[in-house]
Image (spheres, rainbow, N blue to C red):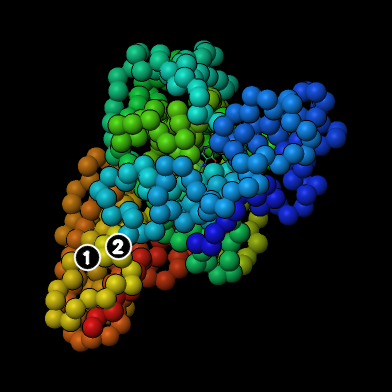
Amino acid sequence: MTEKKRGIHELYGEDPVAADEQLWGRESDPITRRGFLTKGSLVAMSAAIGASIPFAHLMPRGLIPAALAQTDTPFEIPGKEGLVVLNDRPVNAETPAHLLDDRVTPARHLFVRNNGIPPVTTSIDPDAWELEFGGESIARELKMTVAELKSQFEHYTYQLQLECGGNGRSEFVPPASGNQWSNGAIGCPEWTGVRLRDVLDFVGVKDDAVYVAYYGADLHASGDPDKVPISRGVPIEKALEDETLIAWAMNGEDIPPMNGYPLRLVCAGWPGSVSGKWLRKVVVRNQVHDGPKMTGTSYRVPCKPVAPGTTVPDDEMCIIESMPVKSLVTFPKSGITHAMGEKLAVRGHAWAGDLDVTEVHVSTDFGATWKKAALEAPANRFAWQHWNAEVEFPEIGYYEVWARATDSAGRSQPMVLPGWNPKGYLNNACHRIAVQVA
Ligand SMILES: Nc1nc2c(c(=O)[nH]1)N[C@H]1C(S)=C(S)[C@@H](COP(=O)(O)O)O[C@H]1N2
Ligand SMILES: [Mo]
């Protein structure tokens, strides 16, 4: 990674006027604090600094906070380690495959995918955080605090995969716009919370309910407090599954700030975008949810395969549901040198959206022959499964180890890029690592 200074114009673009508007609001913005601060721009600046600014109302218009202007430390996400930052406005960072070797993904290695500006939650009381229930198919509109959720419903802990729908996007040709994820927008931590189903049973859902969606406390990237960065949902059947959680803990601790503290949805097996972070509101809908990033090319793919580069009409795009079968080689690290004559132990994880993985195979000859790996059962439904194998190399030289998983419906990972789509979702081509045998 190249060193990045957290200068304000790197956070908000090269154009100083645009940067100024992002921070302080446009001239035409409603006058709130001493005539120059808008709520949205203040929140954006606080998020960039990582703290609230008590004397914000005394800051001259256009002042670049020293914390942002005068640091020479590379851009870092507090609590994260070894992640590759793909974007710092908004913050998006992925985990190199070899740092995903743990059976349960530690907080420091869980990727970050933000569509907007995260709320500043450093000094909040998590138990007082309120979650609202609404939508046309909710029986009673009400609010509950995290403390009430914790005390009124049974707690469950599951190990649940979270994978961004755009994981693997960087390989598509023609390229798709968006964060250029390679393989690391995946993780599988342990989540603790209450079942969304139990809470919806208590609140009450009308007979015409078809969809359940979320709103979070993050701010639109423009800083406009009236815009929502993302609000997605799932059909009610998926929302009511045992493992769909309203979670307040990850690996037995508070959820990391960038991963949704203090409360998030975890609805595993589908694109990560359905698992709302900084959860503020759950809506039960009598129609397919139409929030931002539910329509157009967002998290939708052509219903039928198209030629790369095709412009696909809206009504021929379908919402992504279960994620496809996939696997990672997490050990060894790609690029190692291995001693000739010794067996090499390789291992990793495999997962298959709503399905189980039934087999994993590995190849050292670019897919000409395959060897079956040992595969473990998942810790619970929607947890990734661990696999391992031993491979041998006939002579010195350059090799690649490829892994290929097969799901319970008999579908395997492709060895080349799967179906092209406008936004580059669902690339589940085999992961491969380089090995030099010397
Ligand atoms: N409120 C809110 N929830 C959100 C997002 C977001 O930007 N805002 N991003 C979504 C997307 S696209 C993904 S892939 C996951 C990423 O979760 P993580 O950042 O904890 O890894 O969160 C989802 N939930
Ligand atoms: Mo995502």
Gap in angstroms between the C-alphas marked 1 and 2: 7 Å
Please tell me whether mark 1 sits on a helix, a strand or a loop. Answer: strand
Residue 9 shows in this picture:
yes
Query: In the rendered view, does 102 fall on the left or right side of 267?
Result: left
Relative to 227, residue 370 above or below: below
Query: In the rendered view, does 367 fall on the left or right side of 18?
Result: left
Find out whether the residues at labels 1 and 2 contact each other: C-beta distance under 8 Å: yes
Residue 269 shows in this picture:
no
Note whether ligand 1 is within 8 Å of mark 1.
no
- The amino acid on which the numbered mark 1 sits, given as a three-letter code, is Val
Q: Going by the picture, which residue comes out furthest to the right?
A: 28
Residue 238 shows which numbered tag? none
Q: Depth check: give the residue in front, 6 or 167.
A: 6
- The amino acid on which the numbered mark 2 sits, given as a three-letter code, is Val
Residue 226, position as x, y percentages in the image: 70, 30
Q: Residue at x 65, y 55 (%)?
A: 313
User: N-terminal of the two: label 1 or label 2?
Assistant: 2
Dot 1 crowding, Cα within 10 Å, few <14, some 14–19, many 20+: some
Q: Depth check: give the residue in front, 236 or 108.
A: 108
Write down the residue under mark 2: 329
Residue 346 shows which numbered tag? 1
Q: Depth check: give the residue in front, 129 or 432.
A: 129
Q: Residue at x 65, y 36 (%)?
A: 45
The quarter holding residue 31 reads: top right
